[in-house]
Structure formats: C-alpha cells, structure tokens
Amino acid sequence: MDRFKELGIDTHGRTSGKMKTKCPWCHAQRTDKRDKSLSVNLDTKLYLCHYCGAHGSAAIYAGKGRKLGDPLVKFPTATGSNSSCPPTEKPHGDPEQGALTQKQIEWCRDVRHIPPEVLVEAGVAFASISMPISGKEKGWEKRDCLCFNFFENGELVNTKFRDSQKHFKLRQGARTIPYNIDAIRDTPECILVEGEFDALSYMAVGRTDVISVPNGANSQLDWLDELSESHFEQKQVIYLSVDTDRKGRELCRELSRRLGVDRCRIVTYGEAYKDANELLVAEGPDALLKALEDAPIPRLEGTFTAEDLREGLHQLFEEGYTSGVELGIPNLDEIMRLETGRVLSDSGENIACKIARELEQHQVTLLKDVAMFDQMYELNLKYYKELTMYILAGKKRLAEVRSTELEALRKKAEQTGLAEDAQAYNDLVNLCNRFEKKLHDLELTRMVSVQMGPQTRLLQNNDTLMIEKIQSSLVNTIPLWKSQMVLSLGLEHSRQATAAQSAVTNMTNQLLQKNAEMLHMGTVEAARESERGIVDLETLQHTNQQLIATLDEVMDIQTQGAQKRREAEVELQRIEGELKQKLLELRG
C-alpha cells in the first residue's frame, strides 16, 4: 500500500531516497504552479512543505482514517515566514494540561530527535505541577513537566509527569497500563520498550505498534495478566526492545518467559547504546529499523546453532589439524610434540594417574630448561671469547698510546713549558686511566662469564638426571604403584567384606543374648507380680503405724490446749482483780 498516496502526495512511482514534489495542500492556491515546495523522504516516510508548513509522517497518518482535506498539524505562519515547530493540542480536555512550550518542542526535536508531529499524535502535553525533590532538601516543588498520557479505548486513564531533572510521577489511584496500548490491539506484531521516549523513537521511524511498560523495568507485571488475552494472544511476533542494563535484561527474560520464547525477538543496540532513543539520536532512523530487523529469537540456555561452529569448522577445513608445539630438542621433536588448549576431565581418575601427569609436566618443563641451558652455554661461550678479544685489543692499544702519543706530549710540554701543552698531556693521562678502568671492568665481567659456564653445565646435568629419574618413575614406579594399589584395593575390599560379615555375626549374637536376658527378666517379673496381693502387708503396717501416731499427736495437742485454756482463765481473773483494785483506789 502506498501510504503517501493516501495523503495525496505524488511520489512519481519512486519507493526510496529523497525527492521534492508538489504540495497537495497549498499547490492549488499557489501562483507558481511549477514550484515543488514539498520535501519527501521515502525511507523515513517524513514530509515537509517549505511554503505552507504542512509536515508529518506517512507511516503515522496512514491507516488512521485521515483523508485528503482533513486538518493536519501545520506550522504557524507569520508575515510570510514559517516557524520550525508546531503547537500541540490540549489532550482530551484535561484542565491541568496545555500545549507544549516552544522550548520543550525544540528540546524533544533537537536532543531526543522526536519530530513535533509525533508529539502531537502521541498526545504529549505540558503541565506545571508539584513534583518531589530528591537530595538533601527533600519535599515538593512546582515544576514544568512533560505529560505522557495513557489512553485505553480512547479514554484518558493515567498520566506520567516528567520534569527536566528526570523526576517522574503518576496520578495517584489511577490504573497502571502500558503507554500507547491502543496502538497494538489488532496488529500482528508489536514492540515493547522500557520508556516513553523509546516508544516515541519507534513512532518517529514509522512503527506505531509500540508500547512502553509502566514504571520502567519493574517486576510488577500485573498489567500483562490483565491485557494478555485481549492484546497479546494473537500476536505473531513480539519485539522486546528494553534497556541493556541489569534490570532491563531481567525484564526481558521475564517478558519472554510469559509471552512465549518462540514468538519473541530481542532487539540489541550494540555496546555503545543503552536504549532505542540513544541509537536513534546517534545513528539515525535507519540504524533503529536495522536493529529491529536483525532482532534474533531468544536462545534457550545451553543450546547452539551450526552458525556458532562455522568459524571453527571453516578453519579446520582450510588448515587441518595444527602441528604440536616443539620443545626445541631436535631428536625429541621428531618423535613427540605437545598439543595446547585441550583439557581431559576424568571423574574416576585415581591418584597414581594424577601423579604421573604431574611428573610428565615437570619432565616437559625440565626438557625445555635443558634446551635453554644449551643455548645459554653457547651464548656465554661466544660472549667470553668476545670479551677476551676486546680485553687483549684494549691492553695493546693502551700500551701503544702510553709509549708513543703520551710520551710525545710529555716531551713537548717539557720543551715548550706552555700550560696548554701540559693540559693536553694531563688529559691524555686521565683518558688512559679511565680506559684502563674499563678494561678492568671487562676482565671482571669475563670472570663472571667463566664462572657461568660450569654453573650452566651443573644445572643442565641436574635437570638431565631428574628427567631420567622421572622417566624411570613413569616406566617403573608408577606401574608398580598401580599394581600395588590394585592389591591394596583387593585387600581393602576383603577387609570390608570380613568386617561386614563379622558385624553381622556379632549383631546376631548380641541380639540373641539380649533377647534371652529380656525373656528371663520379663518372665520373672511377670511371675512375681502375679503372686503379689492387691496391697502389700508392709504397706498396711506402715499405714496403721502412721494412723496411730497421728491419733496420739492429736490427743496430746488437745490435752495441751485444755491445760493452756485453764491457765489462761486463772490469769485473766488475776488481771481483772488488779484492774478493779486500781479503779477503786482512784475513786477514793
């Protein structure tokens, strides 16, 4: 379907590139009928009239019921000049929201690369509301915000307010739904992004079947359960174009799990970009569409394709198996080479095999050292000969200079008596002395070189002896170990079997003895209990004694109580008589 044709734009049969054509909205009123004032980009589906200011996206307007003659968003004109940004309409009568300011429109266009007509189509508006303040001074402050309106079935359900410092706020108590959800109800494909600007980025390149998940990369996906059947059940392909950070990857895995891995495609932006809007700003619309086109199916963990093995198989086909690593020992390299990059794992490997492998590794290392010591010895011998040659030549030249040139300068200084001749003689003397010191340093170095020869041979001989010892161990000791270990295992198995049988026999004997003891004890106790009366005689005797003692104590207590009462009565009479006598004395 030719989307430009729906708008009345004549593209002359072209399908790609940029071109200029006549504007269907202002051409009839123009005096210059030959002027092609409408610029059209057939790749991005964008158009702009340089005369009347009509502009837009054929990808957005096509299929939405607009026909030629319907009102379009146009640039405001003033005294023959056109402005670069259109106004936006107030969305659906929300009293808090108004048209975007010129500064906001220019910021969206220049910084985020979102065309003004996309902002109009998406219902992005402006509002000045109280927003939370972060940092040390926490609280609320009234700020200018972009308003991203969430519509469902054409009705305003929620609004996200975003200020210049990336503070966000949703309407309190409103339903949580994805942004631009109405755009994917009947589409065969859809794109899920993590932010409203990412959704606007896809709308800017012609993909209006895009939604943004609410609240970013949030683990709460209740909205998906609510809208799954109505909006995602019939989708053939679902593009997951979320951020590439940790939370974005977690959201991508959860969405692909819920929506079905077989119909999901994972959009990537390269290592340099985090989201769709960054890719649009840096690389342009074609790069974003290419990323969408190249989005692969999520791979199941632990699986791979033939494409993953292509490079290795191609290299094997072209080059074959590579030769092993040489040790630098001619005789040994003819019969053995080493292979790198291969690991053999054997879970049942015993200790003898591990020791053998370690000895082989030490043997290889020592073989390399022996070869290195050979090279060191040859280089040291060459160095020694060169030092000897330089020392002999230096001594010869020093003796020659002292006997000829130095003697001539001395005689000349004595004859002329000039200071410069004496100084020349003194300079040559100092030069000869310094040269003699250099020769002495060379002699010391030669002595060290002489000592390095036997040192190198000693180390080489030690390594050779150790190599032979390791080889003897590998050929003789390790197999003997293995044999002895087999015998040890056999003996251990025999010991374990004997111990197990002994344990069974001991347990049987202990069980029989314990059962006999328990039978004896149980039978005797049962017989003893059966012969006992219902109450023991000892119990009755003890009870009778306690009863008699109790009665005796009660009688004693009662007798003592009566005696104390009689004594108390006598005492009370005496006290009463004393009191009466005292009262009579007071009256008299």
Image (cartoon, grey):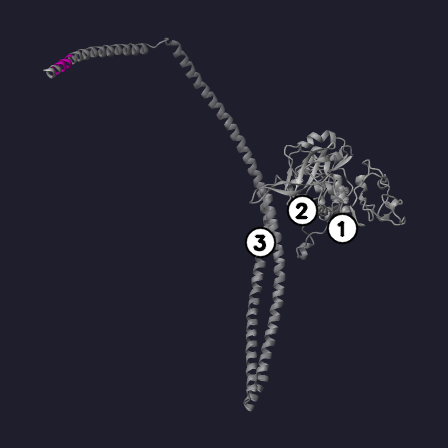
Magenta stretch? 573-582
* Residue highlighted by disc 1: 319
What x and y, as percent, mark residue 444?
A: 55, 70
**Residue type at numbered disc 2:** Arg
**Residue type at numbered disc 1:** Glu
Q: Circle 2 sits in a helix, a strand or a loop, which is it?
A: loop
The alpha-carbon separation of the residues under discs 2 and 3 comes to 27 Å
**Sooner in the amino-acid sequence: mark 3 or mark 1:** 1
**Sooner in the amino-acid sequence: mark 1 or mark 2:** 1
* Residue highlighted by disc 2: 342
* Residue highlighted by disc 3: 466
Predominant SS along the magenta part: helix
Asked if labels 3 and 2 touch by Cβ distance under 8 angstroms, the answer is: no
The alpha-carbon separation of the residues under discs 3 and 1 comes to 38 Å
**Sooner in the amino-acid sequence: mark 2 or mark 3:** 2
- The local crowd at label 1, few if under 14, some if 14 to 19, many if 20 or more residues have their Cα within 10 Å, is few
Task: Say which of 75 and 287 sits in front.
Answer: 75
Asked if labels 2 and 1 touch by Cβ distance under 8 angstroms, the answer is: no
Task: Say which of 305 and 366 sits in front.
Answer: 305
